């Protein structure tokens, strides 16, 4: 299904492209505040994210592997300490989705159409990705965005409209909420912070 992506990514970087949406299925992991079940997102975004701005409609973010879900959280929330995620303060698990109509930002031909690079999507240029997201979410046919993950090589993130979870695209979930393993999280956070800190 083709959609029109039009707008400005920045000074002198206009986008005017007809992009083909792709059908996508898969399993994606999420590590988040226990105030929200693993398959849900807040109605309004409480803070900025890579593909939304604070105050926008809430978006669901998941990662293609478990360790990346924790890494993404740490990258997006640098002031979060491991102690804040001990006890019952977290939800961790995965969802399975099928036949989503997504904008595939892992497809280099799509990136060429949108005048974007893989490196830009993995950088801290949130204004650029937020501008792009504003254009994308304006198209009702788009159910999600598939993009390269930022903190770790080789993984992907899936960003969804939360209403996807109430339809036929939502296959199921597995949630593991409760007492977090502090030693594991200490090890994981230290390892990931070292990776993130690399130039």
Image (cartoon, rainbow, N blue to C red):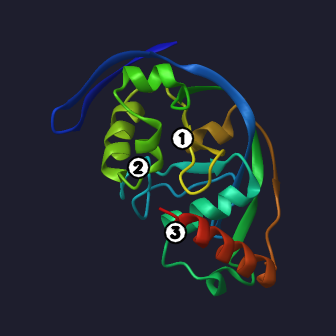
Residue mark closest to the camera, 3 vs 1: 3
Mark 2 closeness class: few <14, some 14–19, many ≥20 residues within 10 Å: many
- The earlier-in-sequence mark between 3 and 2 is 2
Q: Nearer the viewer, residue 40 or 92?
A: 92
Quarter of the rendering containing residue 148: top right
Which mark is on residue 197?
Answer: 3
User: Mark 1 sits on what residue?
Assistant: 161
* Relative side of 137 to 191, left or right: left
Tell me the SS state at disc 3: helix
The x, y position of residue 144, in whole percent, is 55, 34
Identify the residue shown where x is 34% and y is 27%.
Answer: 115
Identify the residue shown where x is 74% and y is 50%.
Answer: 65
Q: CA distance from mark 3 to mark 1?
A: 31 Å
Quarter of the rendering containing residue 137: top left
Tell me the SS state at disc 2: loop
User: Mark 2 sits on what residue?
Assistant: 52
Residue 99 in sight:
no
Identify the residue shown where x is 76% and y is 51%.
Answer: 94
* Relative side of 174 to 67, left or right: right
Q: Nearer the viewer, residue 179 or 104?
A: 104
Residue mark closest to the camera, 2 vs 1: 2
Q: Judge whether 79 appears above or below 128 on screen.
A: below
């Amino acid at each position: 299904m083709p959609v029109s992506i039009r707008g400005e990514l920045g000074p002198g970087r206009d986008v005017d492209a007809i992009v083909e949406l792709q059908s996508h299925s898969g399993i994606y992991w999420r590590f988040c505040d226990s105030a929200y079940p693993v398959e849900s997102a807040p109605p309004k975004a409480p803070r900025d994210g890579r593909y939304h701005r604070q105050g926008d409609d809430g978006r669901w973010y998941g990662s293609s592997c478990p360790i990346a879900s924790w890494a993404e959280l740490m990258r997006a929330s640098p002031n979060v300490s491991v102690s804040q995620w001990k006890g019952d303060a977290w939800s961790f698990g995965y969802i399975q989705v099928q036949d989503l109509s997504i904008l595939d930002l892992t497809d280099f031909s799509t990136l060429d159409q949108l005048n974007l690079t893989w490196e830009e999507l993995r950088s801290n240029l949130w204004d650029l990705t937020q501008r792009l997201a504003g254009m994308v979410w304006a198209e009702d046919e788009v159910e999600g965005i598939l993009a390269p993950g930022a903190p770790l090589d080789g993984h992907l993130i899936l960003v969804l409209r939360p209403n996807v979870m109430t339809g036929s695209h939502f296959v199921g979930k597995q949630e593991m909420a409760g007492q977090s393993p502090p030693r594991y999280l200490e090890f994981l956070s230290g390892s990931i912070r070292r990776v993130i800190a690399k130039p």
